[in-house]
Image (cartoon, helix red, strand yellow):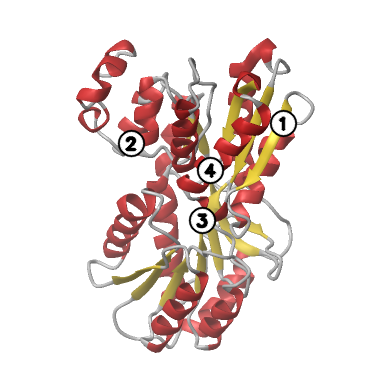
Amino acid sequence: MRRAAVATVATAMAVSLAACGSAKESGDKAEASTSDKKGPITVGLLLPENQTARYEKFDKPLIEKKVSELTDGTGKVVYANAKQDATTQSQQVETMITNKVSVLVVDAVDSKAIASSVKKAKDAGIPVVAYDRLAEGPIDAYTSFDNEEVGRVQGQALLDELGDKAKSGDIVMMNGAVTDPNAAFFKKGALSVLDGKVNIGKSYDTKEWKPENANANMEGAITALGKDKIIGVYSANDGMAGGIITALKGAGFSKLPPVTGQDAELNGVQRIVAGEQFMSVYKSYPQEAEVAAELAVALAKGEKLDSIAKSTVDSPTTKGVPSVIVPVVSLTKDNINDTVIKDGIYTVAEICTAKYKAGCDAIGLK
């Protein structure tokens, strides 16, 4: 099943999240607001932070490449990173409106705070694609992963690994930032699996997703619960997992409890190889980025989205947003070859440096 799931990278899969509205209706609105645009397409790309490796390493270059392909080399991407500051991101939107970009692709730092900026863009005739996080305001399209499913995959992996010891101690939940709507979905998905089946000793909403904040939270949990009581850690992403594992090592754990993750960051994959991190969630950034570029270019041209977005989603402010939801895969030491290596995210050489050679040899990663 994992191999089959990864094989879907080239296919834009869509899961219907809401019955309200239609892609055709939203496409008509976009056509009305962009049909008078002339000249080469300029895509304004706003990403939320640079703490997570994926944004600079994958999302930005992948979107740039696809925009170029879709426009025969005439389109360009203007890029800005908010570095986890919602005010900075709002200013970046203002700049892009002033510079009259054709379309915006926005991964919001704060999904609520961005709403007024999205409205300003729309008022200026610039359509907006919400990328990875469901921004509020009058967005025209949305692409992301099934974020509750991400949480379910993480929770199920942790539960399966604990097996009949699931109630023998406490787990710690290290959730993401409250300003990120995805964090709430991850938590909800994980709890749908874990509630009643494990003892949740401590649960944290980690400010700004920062590894150092997760590290401090984990140190607090160890002090409060006692290291002998902690049997597992739900970590919402790989960056935080790194901070958590540092805290566990610092506390003198003779054997690390299973720690989850997300994003398949290189450091996370290497920790999985080394047996320090149990799993991550691999999300096909190539597929998500390509879909975002397709939606953006279509909107900039004033085209309907029917052929791209087969489902809709409701945000707190906008109903029936055309959307494409990309599937996810549980990444463990057993399927590294079939996921991040097969899809060209990393090479074996990048993963299996001298420090990780023994771990790679043990799992046959050559």
Residue 214 visible in rendering: yes
Amino acid carrying label 3: it is Asp
- Identify which residue is drawn at 43% across, 42% down: 284
Read off the residue under disc 1. 200
* Lateral position of residue 60 relative to residue 112, left or right: left
Q: Quadrant of residue 323?
A: bottom right
Q: CA distance from mark 2 to mark 1?
A: 36 Å
In the displayed orientation, state which residue is furthest to the front: 223
Read off the residue under disc 2. 343
In the displayed orientation, state which residue is furthest to the right: 196
Amino acid carrying label 1: it is Ile
**Label ID, residue 132:** 3
- Closer to the camera in the image, 332 or 177: 177
Amino acid carrying label 4: it is Ala
Q: CA distance from mark 1 to mark 4?
A: 18 Å
Mark 1, secondary structure of its residue: strand
Front label number (2 vs 3):
3
Q: How many marks?
A: 4
Mark 2 vs 1, N-terminal side: 1
- Identify which residue is drawn at 52% across, 56% down: 208
Mark 3 vs 1, N-terminal side: 3
**Circles 2, 3 touching at the beta carbon (< 8 Å):** no
Residue 342 visible in rendering: no
Which x, y percent locates residue 184? 66, 50
Front label number (1 vs 4):
4
